[in-house]
Structures are given as C-alpha cells and as structure tokens.
Image (tube, rainbow, N blue to C red):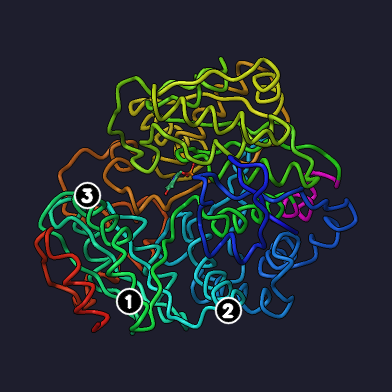
C-alpha cells in the first residue's frame, strides 16, 4: 500500500515514510492510494477475535511495510489489559432498543485520544528504523491539557523515543497539571511555561524551525518529530473501533452481518468520524455517519450547505475538546469525495487560509450528504441530556458524549430513522465532572477531588488514574520563562 498527498498529485511513499514525516512537503495530508476491502467473511471472522487481534487485522491492511509480527506486538503493547482496565479496549454498551454507546475512554488518560496515542509511538519508532534512521526520536508537544498527557502516557518508556511536553503554568486545570507533573517513565520530561498556550505553541514551532538546533541535535543523535493529530498513524488505529463495535453488536445478536448501522460521533478536528468513513469505504455496512457538534457548529453548516466558513464567533463550551473552527481532517474527506482531485483540494485549503471560507462543488456536496448527517447541541441542551440519560437509562455520560446523544435524539425524531446506531463516547464523565454534576442536578461548589467522590454516588467508579493522583508525587515542578524553552530542551537531552 502506497500513500499520496491530498495536495499534490505525484507524491507517493510508504506508510512508514508517511508516519515519520507526519505531513507532506506540499502541506497536504497523507492518504492511502485506495481503501483496502474487508469482506463479510472477514467481518465474521473478526466477531470471534478480541480487540487486539481486530486491531492487528485492520492495521495490517494499511501498514503493508510493517511485518505481521511487528503489528501484533504493537497492538499487544498499546492495548495491554492492565492499561485499559481489561481485554475489552472499547466496550459497546446497550443504551436502549436502537442506541448503543461505544466507550473509547478506558485508557490511561480517560479520553479517546489514548486509542491513537498509545499506538502512534510504536508506529513512529518502527517507521524511524524502517527508513534507516538510527537516531532517537524526540517528540515536542505544546499542550493546553489533554493531548500532552495522552502523548506522555503513550510515549512513556517506548524504546528509541523521548518526549518533552510544555504546558502553560496557569492555563490548565489542577487535575490536568497533576496528570502531567506526576507522569512516570525514564524518557519523559514536563516543563511549565510562564506564558499562555500560544506562547508554548510558538516556542515549540521556533525550535522545530531552527536549522542550527536541528544540526546540533542530529550530532547528539536526536531527531525531532511531532505527535500531531493529522499524522496518518493517529487515524488508522481509530478505524478499528468502528469494526469492533459492529462485531460486538453481531456477537450480541442485535444485528446480522450485512445489516447497516449508523454511527453518531462527537466531532472537533474530524479525525474520529473520518475513521468511520474509512471503515465504510473498506466495506463495513454503515448507513449514516452523524456528525455532532457543540455551539461551534461550523461542520453542521458545512454538511448541510456545502459552505465552510470560519468567519464566525468562537465559543468556549462545556465540551472543550470540540471547540475548534478548523477541522484539519476534513481535508482528507474533500480529497476522497472529489475523486482524488489534489488540485481542487489544494485550492479549497488555499481559500480557507486566505479568506476563511470555501464552497464545494454540487457533486461533493451531494456526496457529503449521502454519507453524513449533522446537528449540534449547546451547553444547556448538553447538560439536560446528561440529566435525562441518567434518569432514563441510569447511564452517566460526559459532556462530549452528551452532545452526540442529544444530536442523535434530534436526528431520530426528525427523520424517523430506527436503524441501530452506535454513539461514540469520547471521555470518562470523571474527566469533566463539574459540568456532568451540573447536568445531574448537583449545584454545590466542590473541590476537584470531592467532585470525583460526588460523581461516584451516581453508581459509577472513578478511574484509578484520576482518583489516584491525590497520592502521586510530583516529578516535574520547574517553571521556565517562555524565552527559555530551548534551554529546557537542552537540559533534558544534555546536548
Ligand atoms: C479530541 C476529542 C474529540 C474530537 O475528536 P476529533 O477527532 O478531533 O473530531 C471529542 N471528544 C473528546 C473528549 C476529545 O478529546
């Protein structure tokens, strides 16, 4: 399997090269040259497999330059039972007669990014070896909270890698700070920055862009890389759970192989739901992919009208991981639905950069409407959904998941569609306990850890990764000025 760029027709590389580079030199994203087909018989065989085997099967279809043994060992390490609270990495639980919830947050940081970020380090370390690089890969991350922790945990003690995370000293929650500063691992380093997230981000970009530093690092045996969400190595592990939840419904007798189901996905950067589109293109029987947004509903408008326009207000919401106005992964969808037209995709992205807006052709708009439906849910409605879902089903969902539940309910009422639907659940309710408690009708002011205790009174158990933070000791307490980020890197890597 070769990979090409969404923006330039003559790019061709292996999976390892695409994963190592992250982004194509023309600014485009890497996409597979075709979608590998999965037959009904293969889906039947997957029903009898555990998650790790299902993952190895799907990854193997794309990563043909990795050996079966490599992929198997990566899946065993990334989805090790002890990291995910058991063998079922992404359990699908029944909500009612038509809806189920696929829980993607049983990993080390209690959010769905773990599914990809536990796998990416292995793919990246493998890619570096395959492309003849003998250096240690150093991942630099600037984070506003969640991605930093998920990346730290994913790269923790992975051979051939080191990771340095910068976070704004006053820009993350107490729990987020503790999650990072108590991180285990001999190859991890965490530094607070005296500045905001943009300062941290700019500092990291400056280090990446400095050719002298690159040469010095190279002489010391290091190569910088990023764990960015547009890396194909983050997309492919997400395709797995669409197949896996389908297989779970078959195993439970809710559907038969060949029956079509819907997926409803809380969406920000369009990575999760794009993986559902990939699964469909590979042959998974999918009817509609329902794209759920919060008040930042740029994707709802795009899917309904074919116009993508970021010239609008930006809202901070109770589902912060979906507060996004540029959904990077949409570029891949435009490329695929235009029949692989790199020039057209590049033109849309140029318009977006220059004017903040583009309008797709009628043919693309119709293709989008054929595969996708869309809706949004504001914060009040989201909290109401949390309360109602608990009252009716004794199920507590986080704010991001609640956006999807609300959008699904609206969709079902509007269309009368009674197709079985899997709602993707992207975070543990304990991760956003303040707003979840409000949705459940608890209004008292509580400290962070008291909120976890309070939420347990609704019949669910706080993940040990969060509750246990209380007793972990802080390993990284240094604060650097925003102008000293390079010194922090030098101090850690000793070059
Ligand atoms: C990142 C994230 C999302 C959005 O996923 P995309 O792939 O960016 O669309 C939704 N919910 C949570 C909790 C997340 O962390």
Q: Which residues are magenta?
A: 247-257
- Which label sits on residue 197? 3
Disc 3 or 2, which lies upstream in sequence? 2
Q: Nearer the viewer, residue 191 or 407?
A: 191
Give how far across and how far down residue 437 sits, in percent: 30, 43
- Within 10 angstroms of label 1, few (less than 14), some, or many (20 or more) residues? many
Residue tagged 2: 132
Asked if the magenta segment contains residue 253, the reply would be: yes
**Looking at this view, is 467 or 125 the one in front?**
125
Packing grade of label 3 (10 A; few <14, some 14-19, many >=20) is many
Kindly state the secondary structure of the residue where label 1 is placed: helix
Q: Quadrant of residue 1?
A: bottom right
* Residue at (59, 74) in percent of width and height: 131
Q: Tell me the quadrant of ligand 1.
A: top left
Q: How far, Cα to Cα, is label 2 from label 1?
A: 17 Å
Counting from the top left corner in percent of width and height, residue 431 is at: 34, 53
Residue drawn at (51%, 34%), measured in percent from left and top?
405
Which secondary structure lies at badge 2? loop
Task: Give whichever of discs 3 and 1 has the lower sequence position.
Answer: 3
Q: Is residue 291 found left or right of 35 in the rendered image?
A: left
Looking at the figure, which quarter contains the C terminus? bottom left
* Residue 63 within the segment the image draws in magenta: no
Residue 274 vertical placement versus 305 (above, below): below
Task: Check if mark 3's residue and mark 1's residue have beta carbons within 8 Å.
Answer: no
Residue 217: assigned label: 1
Pointer 3 and pointer 2: residues touching (CB < 8 Å)?
no
Give the residue at x 58% y 53%: 235
Q: Where in the figure is residue 280, as x and y percent of width and height?
A: 74, 42
């Amino acid at each position: 399997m070769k990979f090409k760029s969404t923006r330039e027709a003559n790019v061709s590389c292996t999976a390892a090269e695409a994963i190592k580079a992250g982004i194509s030199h023309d600014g485009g994203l890497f996409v597979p040259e075709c979608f590998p087909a999965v037959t009904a018989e293969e889906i039947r065989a997957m029903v009898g497999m555990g998650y790790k085997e299902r993952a190895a099967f799907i990854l193997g279809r794309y990563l043909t330059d990795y050996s079966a043994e490599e992929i198997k060992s990566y899946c065993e390490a990334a989805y090790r039972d002890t990291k995910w609270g058991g063998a079922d990495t992404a359990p699908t639980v029944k909500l009612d007669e038509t809806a189920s919830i696929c829980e993607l947050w049983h990993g080390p940081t209690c959010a769905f990014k773990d599914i990809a970020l536990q796998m990416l380090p292995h793919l990246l370390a493998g890619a570096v070896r395959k492309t003849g690089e003998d250096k240690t890969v150093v991942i630099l991350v600037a984070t506003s909270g969640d991605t930093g922790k998920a990346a730290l945990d994913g790269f923790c003690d992975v051979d051939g890698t080191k990771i340095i995370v910068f976070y704004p000293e006053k820009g993350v929650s107490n729990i987020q700070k503790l999650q990072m500063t108590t991180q285990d691992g001999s190859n991890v380093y965490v530094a607070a920055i005296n500045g905001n997230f943009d300062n941290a981000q700019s500092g990291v970009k400056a280090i990446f862009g400095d050719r002298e530093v690159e040469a010095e690092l190279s002489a010391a045996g290091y190569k910088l890389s990023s764990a960015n969400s547009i890396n194909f190595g983050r997309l492919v592990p997400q395709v797995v759970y669409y197949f896996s939840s389908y297989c779970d419904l078959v195993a439970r007798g809710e559907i038969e192989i060949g029956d079509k189901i819907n997926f409803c996905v809380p969406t920000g950067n369009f990575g999760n739901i794009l993986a559902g589109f990939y699964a469909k293109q590979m042959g998974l029987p999918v009817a509609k992919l329902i794209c759920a947004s919060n008040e930042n509903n740029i994707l709802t408008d795009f899917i309904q009208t074919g116009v993508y326009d970021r010239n609008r207000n930006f809202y901070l919401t109770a589902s912060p991981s979906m507060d996004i106005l540029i959904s990077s992964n949409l570029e891949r969808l435009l490329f695929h639905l235009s029949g692989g037209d790199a020039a057209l995709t590049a033109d849309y992205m140029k318009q977006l950069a220059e004017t903040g807006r583009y309008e797709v052709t009628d043919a693309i708009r119709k293709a989008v409407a054929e595969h996708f439906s869309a809706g949004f849910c504001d914060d009040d409605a989201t909290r109401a959904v949390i309360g109602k879902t608990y009252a009716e089903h004794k199920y507590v969902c986080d704010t991001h998941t609640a956006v999807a539940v609300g959008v699904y309910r609206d969709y079902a009422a509007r269309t009368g569609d009674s197709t079985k639907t899997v709602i993707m659940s992207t975070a543990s309710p304990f991760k956003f306990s303040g707003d979840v408690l409000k949705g459940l009708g608890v209004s008292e002011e509580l400290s962070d850890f008291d909120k976890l205790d309070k939420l347990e009174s609704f019949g669910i158990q706080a993940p040990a990764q969060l509750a246990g933070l209380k007793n972990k000791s802080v390993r990284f307490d240094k604060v650097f000025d925003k102008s000293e980020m390079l010194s922090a890197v030098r101090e850690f890597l000793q070059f």
